[in-house]
């Protein structure tokens, strides 16, 4: 009996589920219909019939100090077959890092009827109040109410006949960072001291609080992965600084670097001086640091080779470097001459005396025929050494057997070698 | 006029001519020596100097000038004949600078014209300051963020006012260039401001 009820209930549920599935499936087309209707409604609202005008210039950028003003003249040409009314207004952009106030702008004339193909000049004057923070302010100036149609309601209409308008509100910095860049080749296990000079040219004291920036990998070529490969941890750098740079005085921020014994690679970091002054933008109050940790090898590079003939052995050692890299950075390394300490071991294990037969200085000279900034065009045609090389060639009497060449490069970042056995017969 | 008078007049004229010639010669020579000796650097020639070497030296001395507030130690000139003019290459160095200032001139009919220059004799603190101002520029830092290689050591070159006028204003500027990355900033050191940025291909 119970089994019968259970069977009926199960059958009932089955029937219900069978009947329900098509209904559930029918939900989809119903939904689709609604969507289509919405699109049609939106489409009906699209206004593609807008006035065509030419705006010259199509964009404008001004640099204005707080409390000052500037103006730009814009010419509007009516490209329609009928007279139109042009009444420019500020269209606030939601995408600006700072909020552009409509009240800063005065446009004259306020409204004009422009005949077909006629031109009308508008003067856009911008007054920046004294208390405005420095920074970039973006907006647009719309000349007609025509809006770019969108399939959805837009809180900030995209005006068709508009020009981009940006104002860089700036002030000369009250504090000058005399050492905004620290770089150099440093050696593992060594310590280095640098000074960042800050000159306060204002008539008031300015607070500072220099710290290593948490976001200090901004110039790192390898992105966030480089943190893993960074030659130094931030705590290798100690910063000592006063809390205030007094008016008219120069303060010194001391940077002490202790390069760990096992450090290798590069370090790119930023010291944020945290200068408490509105004339300094966030990215301006920073000191870039760029160190290459260089390690002078203490043991020579060893290369084993076999001579199959009793012939003179000729060994060439070479090193080259870019001219600018030779002088890297801020005088942190001595300008020491590149040289090689070398030893040649014969098949019997004895050291063989090598004879220096040739020393070569080489270079690559540019004559300016490269992609260069336009303001350096006057250097075209003038020789400029961009890469130098130095090589030494030695000979030693040869024997058949296994040899070993040991080379310890001094003050070289890279070197190359060649070993040649050549019979005189 | 008797014979005595004629002799006296002749002697007087000869004396005047000699004196006049002496004055002119003396003026020119002393002027040249004065001008050259007033320089704080030495001018020398590589190879055989051209016949107009003294006049060229004077004009070069007026044309070349080191970075403001600094001095050259010496200026070495070399000349080559180019049709009816002389091409002059000047290398101006100072013991306290890493790099030299290089100038190319042409000299013809007593006129010296600057053809080109590559000026890198810049005090080290100024070099570093210029690099620092450049890397703090928004566009330059954005280029590095976008993948330009900031590791390479940039060149720092002095841009003369006649060139700077085309891009900003007629004053001495510094060009900080990462050639490997085709990134350059034109820096006005007086205002500590990047006035132009170039991002190449």
Image (tube, rainbow, N blue to C red):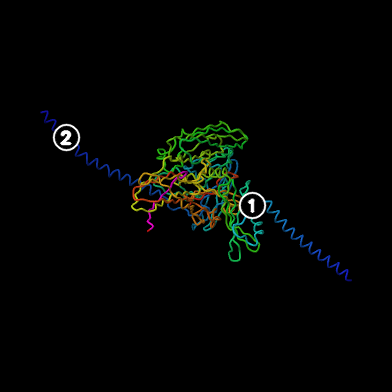
Q: Name the chain letter of the residue that bears numbered label 2.
A: A
As drawn, the label of residue B42 is 1
Rendered view: B24 above or below A97 = below
Residue B91, how many percent across, how many down?
Answer: 58, 53
Q: In the displayed orientation, state which residue is furthest to the top.
A: A2
Residue A136 visible, this orientation: no
Q: In the displayed orientation, state which residue is furthest to the left.
A: A1
Label 1 element class: strand
Residue stretch in magenta: A410-424
* Viewer-proximal residue among B53 and A217: B53
Q: Is residue B163 left or right of residue A420?
A: right
Both marks 1 and 2 on one chain: no
How many neighbours does mark 2 have within 10 angstroms: few (below 14), some (14-19), or many (20 or more)?
few
Residue name at image x 27 percent, y 43 percent: A28
Residue A288, how many percent across, how many down?
Answer: 50, 40
* Viewer-proximal residue among A172 and A392: A392
Q: Is residue A122 left or right of residue A409?
A: right
Please give the count of numbered marks on the rendered protein: 2
* Viewer-proximal residue among A180 and A123: A180
As drawn, the label of residue A12 is 2
Residue A317, how many percent across, how many down?
Answer: 43, 49
Rendered view: A44 above or below B88 = above
Let me know if residue B189 is in the magenta part.
no
């Amino acid at each position: 009996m119970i089994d019968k009820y259970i069977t009926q209930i199960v059958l009932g549920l089955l029937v219900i589920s069978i009947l329900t599935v098509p209904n559930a499936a029918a939900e989809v087309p119903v939904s689709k219909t609604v969507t289509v209707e919405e699109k049609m409604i939106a489409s009906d609202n699209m206004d593609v019939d807008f006035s065509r005008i030419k705006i010259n210039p199509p964009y404008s950028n001004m640099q204005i100090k707080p409390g000052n003003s500037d103006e730009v003249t814009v010419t509007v040409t009516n490209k329609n077959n009928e007279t139109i009314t042009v009444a420019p207004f500020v269209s606030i952009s939601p995408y600006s890092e700072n909020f552009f106030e409509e009240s800063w702008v005065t446009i004259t004339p306020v409204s004009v009827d422009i005949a077909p193909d006629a031109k009308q000049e508008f003067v856009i004057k911008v007054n920046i109040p004294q208390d405005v923070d420095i920074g970039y302010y973006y907006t647009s100036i719309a000349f007609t109410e025509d809006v770019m149609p969108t399939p959805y309601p837009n809180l900030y209409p995209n005006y068709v006949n508009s020009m981009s308008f940006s104002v860089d509100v700036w002030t000369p910095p009250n504090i000058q960072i005399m050492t905004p860049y620290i770089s150099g080749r440093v050696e593992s296990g060594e310590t280095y001291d640098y000074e960042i000079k800050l000159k306060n040219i204002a008539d008031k004291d300015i607070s500072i609080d220099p710290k290593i920036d948490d976001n200090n990998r901004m110039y790192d070529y390898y992105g966030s992965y480089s943190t893993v490969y960074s030659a130094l941890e931030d705590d290798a750098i100690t910063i000592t600084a006063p809390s205030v740079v007094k008016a008219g005085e120069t303060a010194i921020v001391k940077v002490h670097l202790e390069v760990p014994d096992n450090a290798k690679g590069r370090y790119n970091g930023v010291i944020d001086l945290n200068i408490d002054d509105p004339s300094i933008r966030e990215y301006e109050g920073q000191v870039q640091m760029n160190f290459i940790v260089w390690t002078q090898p203490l043991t020579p590079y060893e290369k084993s080779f076999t001579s199959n003939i009793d012939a003179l052995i000729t060994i060439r050692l070479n090193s080259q470097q870019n001219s600018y890299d030779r002088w890297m950075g801020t005088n942190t390394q001595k300008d020491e001459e590149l040289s090689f300490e070398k030893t040649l071991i014969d098949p019997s294990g004895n050291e063989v005396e090598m004879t220096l037969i040739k020393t070569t200085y080489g270079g690559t000279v540019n004559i300016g025929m490269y992609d260069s900034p336009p303001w350096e065009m006057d250097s075209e045609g003038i020789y400029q050494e961009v890469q130098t090389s130095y090589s030494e060639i030695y000979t030693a009497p040869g024997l058949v057997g296994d040899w070993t060449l040991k080379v310890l490069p001094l003050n070289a970042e890279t070197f190359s070698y060649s070993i040649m056995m050549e019979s005189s017969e | 006029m008797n014979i005595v008078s004629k002799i006296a007049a002749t002697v007087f004229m000869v004396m005047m001519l000699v004196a006049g010639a002496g004055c002119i010669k003396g003026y020119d020579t002393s002027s040249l020596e004065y001008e050259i000796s007033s320089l704080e650097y030495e001018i020398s020639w590589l190879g055989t100097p051209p016949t107009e070497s003294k006049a060229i030296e004077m004009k070069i001395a007026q044309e070349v000038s080191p970075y403001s507030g600094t001095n050259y130690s010496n200026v070495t000139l070399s000349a080559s004949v180019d049709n009816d003019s002389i091409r002059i290459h000047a290398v101006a160095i100072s013991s306290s600078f890493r790099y030299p200032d290089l100038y190319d001139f042409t000299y013809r009919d007593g006129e010296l014209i600057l053809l080109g220059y590559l000026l890198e004799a810049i005090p080290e603190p100024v070099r570093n300051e210029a690099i620092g101002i450049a890397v703090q520029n928004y566009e330059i830092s954005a280029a590095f963020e976008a993948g330009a290689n900031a590791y390479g050591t940039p060149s720092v070159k002095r841009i003369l006012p006649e060139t700077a006028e085309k891009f900003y204003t007629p004053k001495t500027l510094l060009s900080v260039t990462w050639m490997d990355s085709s990134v350059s900033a034109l820096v006005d050191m007086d205002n500590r401001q990047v006035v132009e940025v170039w991002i190449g291909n």
